[in-house]
Image: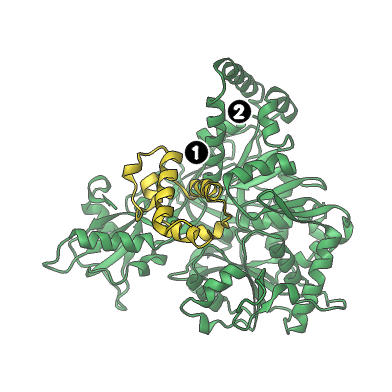
Amino acid sequence: MLDLGQYTCLGAALREALERWPDETCLIEADRERENCRLTYRQFQEAALPLARGLQHLGFAPGDRAAIVMTNQSKWLISAYAIFYGGGVLVPLDYKLSAREQLQLLAHSKVQVLVIEHHLWRAMMQAEGFKDLGAKTVLVTEAPAGADLAGAGRWEECRASGEPQFVPRARRDVACIVYSSGTGGRPKGCVLTHENYLEQCMALTALFPFWPGVRYLSILPTNHAIDFMVGFIGPFTCGAAVVHLRTLRPEYVRDAFPRYKITYLGLVPMVLTNLERGLRARFDALPPYRRFILNRLIGLNRRLTRRRPNLTLSRLLLRQVHQAFGGELRALFGGGAFMEPSTLQFFYDLGIPVANGYGLTEAGTAITLNDFKPFRADTVGKPLPGMELKIVNPDAEGVGEVAVRSKTVMSHYLDDPELTSETIQDGWLLTGDLGRLDAAGHLQLFGRVKNMIVTEGGKNVYPEDIENSFEGLAVKELCVFAANYLWPARTLRAEELIIVLRFDVGKEFTETWRADLAARDRRLPDFKRISGYVIWDEDFPRTASMKIKRGVLAEALRGKLDRETAVVKL
Amino acid sequence: MRTPEETVEEILSLAAVHFKVPREQLSPDDDFFKKLKIDSLQALELLTRLEHHFNIELPDYEMQGVTDFRTLAERIQARL
């Protein structure tokens, strides 16, 4: 791999990678059984440089911001490289947000350029706030001939001949602005520097190296910090390849392992659980004698790999299982949300170790990761090289808020010095998560200090962000909480959102009212939905500016109500 | 050519078989995530079954924001 300590910016490191491994495959893009494209590093460069030149022709200047709103595909990475090449700042946005939410973040980040897929652009054109879109240049990918693009250009036509100007950046310059939340409330734009990414990449690849021939299956959204790192920067700076699937149907994901001989895959609990379910169904369908043999082999593998994984042995013992995964799979990277230890153990016993980790966008990507020395299903691993961890205000059991200090920690929140100073204190990033470091130096997580949830799909959801969806309900006041915040639970399981409702005097709960609540809830993306409601009979405490004092309200609620009896399932 | 009513009816029947729930428990306006107790990946699995049945191809993004059988039927009907 490249020695990333020698580079000042992502653009320079990526440029060197494209020169160093010209004939290695860097990208494969598939849609169902069809392969859309396969690019070598040279071909990737040939696709990206005319775009970089085209952007410069359109006035894109060093330090300008460019957003990408796309599903995982080759044009995402090509566009990102073109942006870095010209010294730009990348703003990767979640394509699963609603168009209105995307417009809010585009306005907040004040981008000059927007690169977007056609179906997402179509939705954006019809969204409230579209007329206020400030981007000077919009490039739409894969637009059908004759499509009305409302003045936007076609990505495929944004090409200019000649050598684009490469603009190097300093290590402390901004590389990306990544939103960790805040679409409905306070946007949290994490400002990450080139140093943050270069240091994170060095730390991760020290534990899990990539090399030419390695193939990473990219199914987590590339806008997400994990996939941006292990599905782009990591493999590219090591001469490895990234495989994109245009569909995330489980059956096509499963087919991709043997078809493309996948080496690594990053995933969230929902995907891992889905893989487990599929495997268990196949095991259950085996004739009894074969099931018996399989169970014996799994047991033997478990015993023989207790101290450390032994890929060669596991592939020999459980040949058919490994062949179903293509025979080249070395590890799965798990993170983004709580992973069930039993699921992690299930895969480890099959000889498919899941490197379970912990991190947050504000800290670059990962803070801790399991190194399999030995495998632990009950922790999120040890701090990565270069990460300092401490537990703030630990209780008698050593549990307190996890804080981290490292070169990967973001610079600040965009345009929010107050939130920045609350979150980064004396160089320590306060994560808002409760944890404990055990005697072996492993981090164990026990819940959250902050009022938020993380879904099985790895999505952070802040209650304030969804409250506006319930505006207009026939209630006097409402407030959304994470249930585990209201009633602190030392667990990351059963995370759910609930809404607290205060009726006007004389008004009562009716079935019509309940239907209205349910209908509004259904309009939210599935991962943002509330699971129940609580009726509260006191006015909400408010500040002088009439904002709800959430902490005070939470205290009052937990003092008078019990979770089991107060929460009514919706 | 199927009518929209026929399309939604076929979807309900396929979902009932695929997720092993009695057909009579499903209605066009049900939130299938809640009614079938499934996650978004399982919803995509259902989509593949529907593609094969109706002999169409539906990009994943067509499912974004879709939570009830009737809207799903509309998306499929538009491609028949």
Which callout, 2 or 1, points at the residue further toward the start of the chain?
1
User: In this view, which residue lies farthest toward the left?
Assistant: A506
For disc 2, the neighbor class at 10 Å (few under 14, some 14 to 19, many from 20) is many
- Counting labels gives 2
Question: Which chain appears yellow?
Answer: B
Q: Is residue A492 visible?
A: no
Going by the numbered disc 2, the residue's amino acid type is Asp
Q: Is residue A551 left or right of residue A175?
A: left
The residue positioned 79% from the left and 58% from the top of the image is A5
Question: Which chain appears green?
Answer: A
To which quarter of the image does residue A310 belong?
A: top right
The residue positioned 35% from the left and 49% from the top of the image is A488
Query: In the image, is residue A210 above or below residue A351?
Result: below
Q: Which mark is residue A15?
A: none
Q: Which residue is mark 1?
A: A340
In this rendered view, identify the residue nearer to me: A208 or A52: A52
In this rendered view, identify the residue nearer to me: A558 or A286: A286
Going by the numbered disc 1, the residue's amino acid type is Glu
Helix or strand or loop: what does disc 2 sit on? Answer: helix
x, y (%) of residue A496?
38, 51
For disc 1, the neighbor class at 10 Å (few under 14, some 14 to 19, many from 20) is some
Q: Which residue is mark 2?
A: A349
In this rendered view, identify the residue nearer to me: A489 or A62: A62
x, y (%) of residue A257?
69, 41
